[in-house]
Amino acid sequence: MRFTMVRLFWTILLTLEHRGESITRHTNVKCEALDKSFAEFPVCNLKVLGRGVIAENMHIKLLKLPVQKISVNIAVYKKLSGYHPFLFNVTADLCHYLKHPNPMNLLHYIYTAVKPFSNFNHSCPYNVSTNLIYHDIVVKDFVLSDQMFAKIPYPKGNYMLSIKFATDDVWRIRLNTYFDVDLEKQN
Ligand SMILES: *[C@@H]1O[C@H](CO)[C@@H](O)[C@H](O)[C@H]1NC(C)=O
Ligand SMILES: *[C@@H]1O[C@H](CO)[C@@H](O)[C@H](O)[C@H]1NC(C)=O
Ligand SMILES: *[C@@H]1O[C@H](CO)[C@@H](O)[C@H](O)[C@H]1NC(C)=O
């Protein structure tokens, strides 16, 4: 069931064409170190680039290198009274994915969407290095594109995409992105 949904999601996304008016946008972003000794966030904010164009910026400083193995959990929540799980909740092995990218999963979709706006350019391990900047993770001016949402069954509303990272089976980082979807604006 879950696989079918992810597959559907992915297939739909691949067949979308761009539309004029924006139907989705960032409303907030929160970067949280669940383990404060693991990471810091010199930058974690939204920036208005133009009319209705809101970009996300993030700088993640990893404090405990090397990192050999990373689990990532991706979950979507919808706001009713409070945020409730919505449709997706996927956990994956990030290092395995980086070595063997599998287009049939949600992680691949998010990774390929964010990658052009980031400095991700190598797979695991993230080692101790003299050039620390190299291992910091920077996302610059990432704009949600309507293709990500336009034809998925996302009812109008407020959503939160929560991405958590774990090493040694302990959740260390949580990145929450809040966004609005308004499909009625379509066409
Ligand atoms: C996602 O699934 C995991 C494991 O099945 C569970 O522990 C977690 O509570 C779920 N999260 C959400 C948001 O449903
Ligand atoms: C990744 O980026 C770093 C820093 O800019 C650079 O030194 C390195 O050669 C790049 N590696 C790859 C595989 O592109
Ligand atoms: C990272 O460290 C491991 C062993 O600690 C080593 O085998 C590997 O080559 C290193 N990788 C990089 C990119 O420096």
Image (spheres, helix red, strand yellow):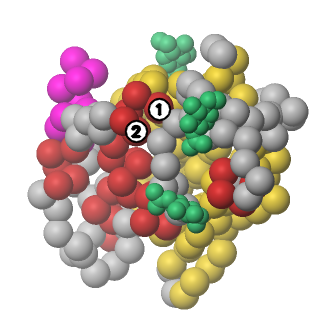
Q: Residue at x 15, y 45 (%)?
A: 11
- The answer to whether residue 169 shows anywhere in this view is yes
- Asked if the stretch drawn in magenta spans residue 70, the answer is no
Residue type, mark 1 in image: Leu
Q: Which element carries disc 2, helix, strand or loop? A: helix
Tell me where residue 140 appears, x and y as whole percent.
59, 69
Q: Say which element carries label 1.
A: helix
Q: Which residues are magenta?
A: 1-9
Magenta region includes residue 6: yes
| Quarter of the rendering occupied by the N terminus | top left
User: Which label sits on residue 94?
Assistant: 1
- State whether label 1 is within 8 Å of ligand 3: no
Q: Residues within 10 Å of mark 2 (few under 14, many from 20)?
A: some
Q: Which mark is residue 98?
A: 2
- The response on whether ligand 2 sits within 8 Å of label 2 is no
Task: Please identify the quarter of the rendering in which residue 92 is found.
Answer: top left
| Quadrant assignment, res 115 | bottom left
Residue 61 versus residue 21 in the image, above or below: above
Q: Are marks 1 and 2 in contact (CB under 8 Å)?
A: yes
Query: From the viewer's perspective, is 22 left or right of 166?
Result: left
Residue 99 in the image: above or below residue 42: above
Q: Residue at x 52, y 43 (%)?
A: 161
Which residue extends farthest right?
37
Please indicate, yes or no, whether residue 154 appears anywhere in the rendered image: no
- Vertical position of residue 110 compared to residue 15: above or below: above
Are there few (<14), some (14-19), or many (20+) residues within 10 Å of tag 1? many
Three-letter code for the amino acid on which mark 2 is drawn: Leu
